[in-house]
Image (cartoon, coloured by chain):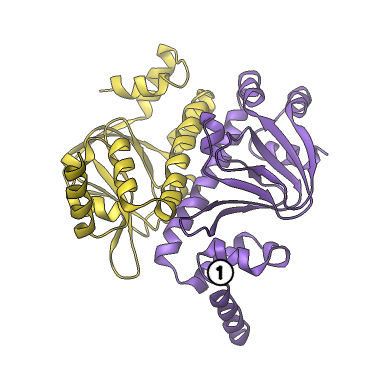
Chain colours: A purple, B yellow
Amino acid sequence: MFQEVDKHITRCSPFSQAELELFHSKLKPRKVRKRTFLLSEGEVCRFEAYIVKGCVKKYFIDNNGDEVILQFAVEDWWISDIASFAEQKPSNLFIETLEDSELLMIDFESKEQLYKEIPHLERVFRLMLQRSYAVLENRLYSTVANSAEERYLDFIKRYPTIPQRVPQQQIASYLGITPESLSRIKSNLIKKS
Amino acid sequence: MFQEVDKHITRCSPFSQAELELFHSKLKPRKVRKRTFLLSEGEVCRFEAYIVKGCVKKYFIDNNGDEVILQFAVEDWWISDIASFAEQKPSNLFIETLEDSELLMIDFESKEQLYKEIPHLERVFRLMLQRSYAVLENRLYSTVANSAEERYLDFIKRYPTIPQRVPQQQIASYLGITPESLSRIKSNLIKKS
């Protein structure tokens, strides 16, 4: 169960067996069905979750009542509302499973304790945050600077397994376009190839 | 010169005098005039800069040739293209001073070496990234979910000194509205108050 998450963290920094065991002791395994809400708007985000298996989305509801998807996460990704978790304040976001999923969840106090006992775990999460920040900034940038087709190509490069796993409408929401535009882009790409 | 940055990092983790001196030895002080480009699109971002004095903006140019401002930074903030710096790959962004500024700059190799020699520096930058991520995610969220007036109020709360220091047009660019809309919002707020 911990094999993948161990690979994930040891890519960033070496861990002793004792440190890995301490780390495991703080992770709560959880199996959840498709369409389970892990977080709803107004709640404090109590977890960071590593995805062993499954697919999860993070989104908010805009003024028109539409879903705006901020992130998909699949195997070997972490998901959380970073701001709500870090400051233990109410979230604006929803986190919901898109498939039956197996997660390893850690709560705020356990994570702070781990940082104390395994200081170089800071490096793992510093590097993870760096990547998340880069993805988010690229998203903000590409929404304005790139065409919808470029954004779709970038999306399938970053998330190669998602198009087979997630309804088209959700991918359109992530890209900030209508499902009809996404269909058009996909048929154009097929014609071109 | 290092007084403020020392306060900044010791807020997150305690540092010994020897550690602070090592940290200082890696920071290159630089005084730059207003309208200096610290980074241009296509260059690799070679620095993270702590702002001792001054004001800096980070932006990109969209498909219409317009500036889209991603971040302002003033005293006691860090500025960098995090993705370009972390992966040492070409940037899509510009970083430019808006005032004569005094900076403390650190390059990639020096920072990696510092992480090796002062491992708990990881904590400082992990916390900094957490805040930056929260600001960026909130920006993405609020652009879609909040009114322009709410965004302006949030902006002056986060950056109380910027409205006196930066042309109105730049603030409008950050908020994703026209300078005319910003004027309207400001006069409405004055009427209300």
Asked whether residue A58 is in view, the answer is yes
In-image side of A57 versus A146 (left or right): right
Q: Residue at x 16, y 40 (%)?
A: B164
Residue B160 location in percent, x, y? 25, 35
Q: Residues within 10 Å of mark 1 (few under 14, many from 20)?
A: some
Residue A109, quarter of picture: top right
Q: Nearer the viewer, residue A179 or B59?
A: A179
Asked whether residue B39 is in view, the answer is no
Q: Amino acid at mark 1?
A: Tyr
Q: Nearer the viewer, residue A84 or A24?
A: A84
Residue beneath label 1, please?
A152
Residue A104, quarter of picture: top right
Position of the N terminus of chain A, as image quadrant, is top right
**Disc 1: host chain:** A
Position of the C terminus of chain A, as image quadrant, is bottom right
Q: Indicate whether B148 appears above or below A167.
A: above
Which residue is farthest right? Answer: A1
Q: Indicate whether A138 appears above or below B138.
A: below
Secondary-structure class at tag 1: helix
Tally of numbered discs: 1
Residue A112 location in percent, x, y? 61, 23
Q: Residue at x 79, y 38 (%)?
A: A30
Residue A36 location in percent, x, y? 72, 47
